[in-house]
Image (cartoon, helix red, strand yellow):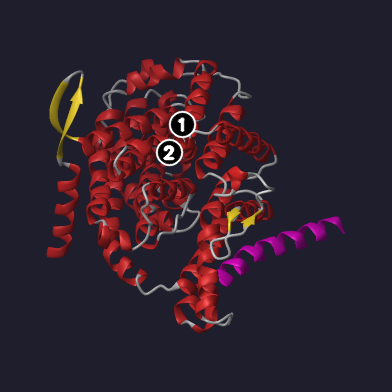
Amino acid sequence: MDAFLYHLSIGFSAVLAMEPVTLFGITANIPVNLLYCFIGAVIGTLIGVLPGLGPVATIAMLLPATYALPPLGGLIMLAGIYYGAQYGGSTTAILVNLPGETSSVVTCIDGYQMARRGRAGVALSTAAIGSFLAGCAGILLLAAFAVPLAKVAFKFGPAEYFSLMVLGLIGAVVLASGNLLKAIGMICLGLLGGIVGTDVNSGVARFTFDVPELSDGIGFVAVAMGVFGFAEVIRNLEQKEHREVFTNKVTSMFPTREDVKRMIAPMLRGTLLGSALGVLPGGGASLSAFGAYSLEKKMSRNRAEFGKGAIEGVAAPESANNAAAQTSFIPLLTLGIPPNPVMALMVGAMTIHNIQPGPQVMTTSPTLFWGLIVSMWFGNLMLIILNLPLVGIWVKLLKVPYKLLYPAILVFCCIGVYSVNNTVFDVFMTAGFGILGYVFAKLGCEGAPLMLGFVLGPMMEENFRRSLLLSHGDFSVFFSRPLSLALLCATALLIVLVALPAVKKKRTEAFQEE
């Protein structure tokens, strides 16, 4: 307990550290990291409110900006954008029936119906309270399990890391929505893209097609910003704007005593489910929100009201997605494995500052590790202030036509990509990946598996080849080590679980054809 409190004191000291800042010719000492946390929370809320932009696209766009920031400040800001978007997405879901973020799709079902019945204020406060309490619970779990998991991670060798990454990729396929074969194809494409460049061992250029700019590999920022940023803008231009905003019906924000009784249990169940699913590869906030809503429909005494404005249908998914947003940092910070595309972008942000994600961060950079965790609590507290009293301001942003927003977004993306290496080649590459991302969206292929494959590809290859070098080319090293064997068995079990429904479906289709 003493060690836990000591670690938290390190985090609070890092976040509240006073640094001199000059603004408009005036120099003052302010807690800079707390300012970055506030900026991230504001941007995240804004992105969550505006339909069409999500945290993945936004973080991809802002990655170049972290070059100019200190490592802790940059990570705090990006983390604030992620969990801030989970908060802000509920506002448009409730008032406009448009999910500002993917995980807010479920909130539309009952939240919008509550708004139509004149209970928009209660729905918004329910979402905010559930998000705050679940976020705090997720932060406590992150802080509590970080040290034990990091100790386990130090026992990992190259073989164990390779097996863990294989499990992560297969888990992402199993839990991803959409066609299974398409998800596998996207992961394979990401793995191939990740090994473009100069071979680490031999120094030979691979898959560069004699293009000098590719000798260092395909830029992470270009891929992320193209597949998620540019492609999202192109796709949103196809959508017709029709928004019915219930701003005039946001009156009382306080839930009644009966509302409080009905929301407590769903919040607890949503928090527990979201905390568990957030750690899993491919889980994340979206899966947690859908899972929590389905669970409440089965367990609630008021299941007949679901779809008609049940307060449980708002409390459970909003609690789940925010708990998942916090606990998804656990595998990233303790094992160095990103469980979802947002965490994959966080890996990119850490490598920008020459920080190797994994258990060594806790020992080599305890200020960064615990400062990031403590900043999440401050960010969740800020989001309560941003989301309840300022609802009117956020809703007014919905009236800005998207045709005015997308040119500014594209210009900002191009400037950001160019600033990374000061080369026009990266801008053209981003545009190419933007077109490719749009084609993927049209074909029903998700960009998340591609991003995870692209990030984990070089790490998998490095650990795979290192394992074979240490074992003198003996492939049995992956099966002779107990921990590696357990991870591969878990991978095989996941493959069996995902294959069984597919076999059953094929049999049913064959039977119907006959």
Q: Are marks 1 and 2 in contact (CB under 8 Å)?
A: yes
From which residue to which does the magenta span run? 489-514
- Of the pair 52 and 63, the residue shown nearer to us: 63
> Residue at point 54% right, 37% down?
228
Provide residue 344's location: percent of width, then percent of height.
46, 50
At mark 2, the secondary structure is helix
Q: Earlier in the sequence, mark 1 or mark 2?
A: 2
Q: Residue at x 39, y 56 (%)?
A: 332
Q: Position of residue 246 (x, y in %)?
A: 42, 19
Is 417 covered by the magenta stretch?
no
What's the residue at 52%, 57% (across, down)? 456
- In the rendered view, does 248 fall on the left or right side of 174? left
What secondary structure is found at the residue carrying circle 1?
Answer: helix
Q: Is residue 260 above or below residue 216?
A: above
Q: Horizontal and vertical percent for residue 368? A: 26, 51
Mark 1 Cα within 10 Å, few/some/many (few <14, many 20+)?
many
Q: Quadrant of the C terminus?
A: bottom right
Q: Is residue 490 visible?
A: no
Q: Which residue is mark 1?
A: 416
Examine the residues drawn in magenta and state their main secondary structure: helix
**At label 1, which amino acid type do we have?**
Gly
Q: Taking 509 as reference, is 244 above or below it?
A: above
Residue nearest the viewer, comparing 243 with 56: 56
Which of the pair 46/131 is nearer the observer?
46
Q: Which residue is mark 2?
A: 63
Quadrant in the picture for residue 314 = top left
Q: CA distance from mark 1 to mark 2?
A: 8 Å
- Which quarter of the figure is the N terminus placed in? bottom left
> What type is the residue that disc 2 sits on?
Leu
The quadrant in which residue 104 appears is top left
